[in-house]
Image (cartoon, rainbow, N blue to C red):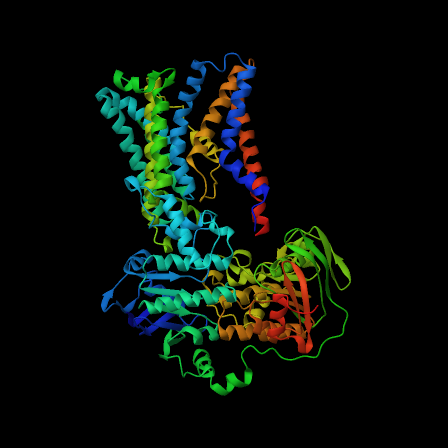
Amino acid sequence: MLETDGVRKAFPGVTALDGVSFSLGTGEVHALVGENGAGKSTLIKVLTGVYRADAGQVRYRGEPVSFASPLDAQRAGIATIYQEVNLVPQMSVARNLFLGREPRGRFGLIDFAAMRERAGEVLRGYGIGSDVRRPLGSLGLGAQQMVALARAIEAHAQVVVMDEPTSSLQPREVDRLFRAIGDLRGQGRSVVYVSHRLEELYRICDRVTVLRDGRLVHTGPLAGLDRLRLISLMLGRDLDAVRSEGLTRFAERARSHAAPLLRATNLSRRHVLDEVSLAVRPGEIVGLGGLLGSGRSETAKAIAGALPLDSGGVSVAGEAVPPGSVGSAIRAGINLLPEDRKAEGIVATLSVRENIALAALPRLSRAGIVSEGDVDRVVDRFMRRLRIKAAGPGQPVGELSGGNQQKVLLARWLAMNPRVLLLDEPTRGIDVGAKAEVQVLIDELAEEGLAVLLISSDLEELVEGSQRVVVLRDGAVVGELSGADVTEEKIMAAIAGTTDD
Amino acid sequence: MTTTTRERAGSLFRRHGALLVLGALLVIGTLAFDSFTTPANLGNIATASSFLAIVAVGMTFVIISGGIDLSVGSLFVLGGVLAAYGSRYGVVVALLLPLVVCGVFGLVQGVIIARTRMAPFIVTLAGLLAARGLMLSLTDEGATTYLVEDDLFASIGQGAVLDVGYPFLVMLAILAVAVVFLQRTGFGQNVYAIGGNEDAAALMGVPVARTKIVVYLTSGLLAGLAGALNAARLSSGVTILGIGMELDVIAAVVIGGTLLTGGAGGLGGTIAGALLLGVIQNLINQIPGLSSSFQQVVSGAFLAAVVITHRVLGGVRDDDS
């Protein structure tokens, strides 16, 4: 259906794709995997007309093609669903769904009544019952993703490229998405499926292509391919090393009995948080579980002073932190790694060096004059320690892969010598290798005496990473699990509200 | 999850605030001044506001698309001078000359903005200076004033139906067409999409460059047309009136509820905003002993009040998300 032959694409300083020959069959769901920086995104962009290959050929239905733009590719029937939802948040759901293909009425003018009706009909098929006149941005991320998918399928796409489509979906929504993918396969349409969640790949993909450092290292049927073998292909490490290091395994550690370093008491904000209390000891990693919208991120923001509270307070090592101020939270040693790193964390146009030094500048300067030498030392230390892959400290962060951006953010806060780290989805959207690295890093940091609050939708990560898990539902604490009770089943039971307490 | 009363009030105010205040001012004017609610005075306000309103229609497209057009004031003046100059060759030349020249200005600006992705602020600032320079060279540094020499052309600016001047009717016709284009065609949807999220719009297949070019072309054309109508009304190509007009136009659009960040807004509000500025000026002229320059102070204060109200009523969502 769609194939590339010896495609090469280089950017200044890096060869993103080096002679990749990829082939997608008709009615096939094809997994595309690889570490960050392996060239997945570049390959997708070559397939969908965002980039043009420097060398090699792209063939669609047997014919050589050279799409000038994503629009060109879309018209030919190749649609893309991006990792970060790429729709227009201010426009209504219906308008987003039909942008460019609005139903026409008299005189060729847009027939809004028909558009709304049709949009409601289509979206109900995906389990979205909300008013299609609402601005898209007022829907949850999962629902927005479904709108993006519905949009692609409505456009009669023959090939749908999905880049991390499930990273913001609830399990129920994932099931719905997979049913939709199954329907596509049944209709003879093809899907390129990029995800870091191996379970998902094994659930729905027929074949897999593995990229590493811009080269294709494996392509073949997924069934029968051992999971560890797949991971070793992606990482380029031998099987035994992968097996011994484990993938998402955080080191086990005895429970600490020291007095809590971070204590949050009765955090409340109308409609958002309801008397949330929790405590984290030094050296402890406490997980914060719950569904999207349960108040996880809001709790972290409240502790970091970024969310005004109606009542409740935060203390570090027994000292109250003045409420409602990010500055005083940082002075108290509380640092938040936000969920949406694009919007709330990195400054994409600044360099790696500037991004890392940003928050620590007051520390690295004397009488307001920044010591360049100190900055270089700090930046160098963290780039090496976190193994940040960049052309150099001067490269703009926007050019790095997701995992490396996350590491830059982590470095920024570590440069502050924090006492409390709040990590909101620290491994979301980053590849297996970087994920394991980040997880090991979190563990090391805790060992050094930091109090860590870990938010994750990935239950496995929550269970393996934390000593205790606090479960939220509708902005209130509905359960706290520790020791042997920290299991995926117990967390899910607490979320569902079926526990005895 | 549910829309709060405050959010609804915010959205309502943004969309209809200018209209509400306009209504309130009309009531106040009626109660305070006997000479306010006469057909002649109201007709005068409507006619005098139509030039600003026509330019503001184009600016609304520009701002919704996430851009800005600073050149419209200069193009308005240039259009007026060209129309007066062209009127010696008849009504057709008087109308076509400013449209072609200002259209080319808009087109070139649009092409530069769309193709090189330079900031609209800078590109149209260059356009402002270039158009002003062209106008000054045509008029010997403003010393020469061309008079309108075609009666038919002059009547387009001076004629009236029941105290309402033709320019107002032209404005209504343009508004009607513009509303249809903005709200009911794919082009209009594309303008909103580009202003809302340009990258997403491009990925969804919106012809971003073409849409932007059309938007700036439209803005240039409307500025030239408004200038020509103004020259017809005044029987001469005045070289001073209209300098700095771009800021009044932007004020009218923002008061009308269009967000300067792009992606949201509408034409109804813009027209209400333009009429509102006209009414404020008229009311201040009615107050004896108050200099008409004071109008700028009031308009400025009003603009600030509008923006703050938007922030207070409409900014709630930003904090919660």
Res A289 seen here: no
Seen at 49% across and 70% down, the residue is A389
| Figure quadrant of residue A437 | bottom right
Is B307 in front, or is A136? A136
| Residue B308: x %, y % from top left | 57, 37
Foreground pick, B274 / B8:
B8
Q: Is residue B231 above or below residue B261?
A: above
Left or right of A250 on screen, residue A89? left
Q: Is residue A106 above or below residue A170?
A: above
A267 up-or-down from A55: above or below: above
Q: Is residue B277 left or right of residue A79?
A: right
Q: Residue at x 27, y 22 (%)?
A: B85
Point out residue B122 in the picture as x, y percentages from the top left corner: 41, 42
Q: x, y (%) of residue A194?
A: 42, 69
Of all residues, the one furthest to the bottom in this rendering is: A240
Residues A69 and A311: in front is A311
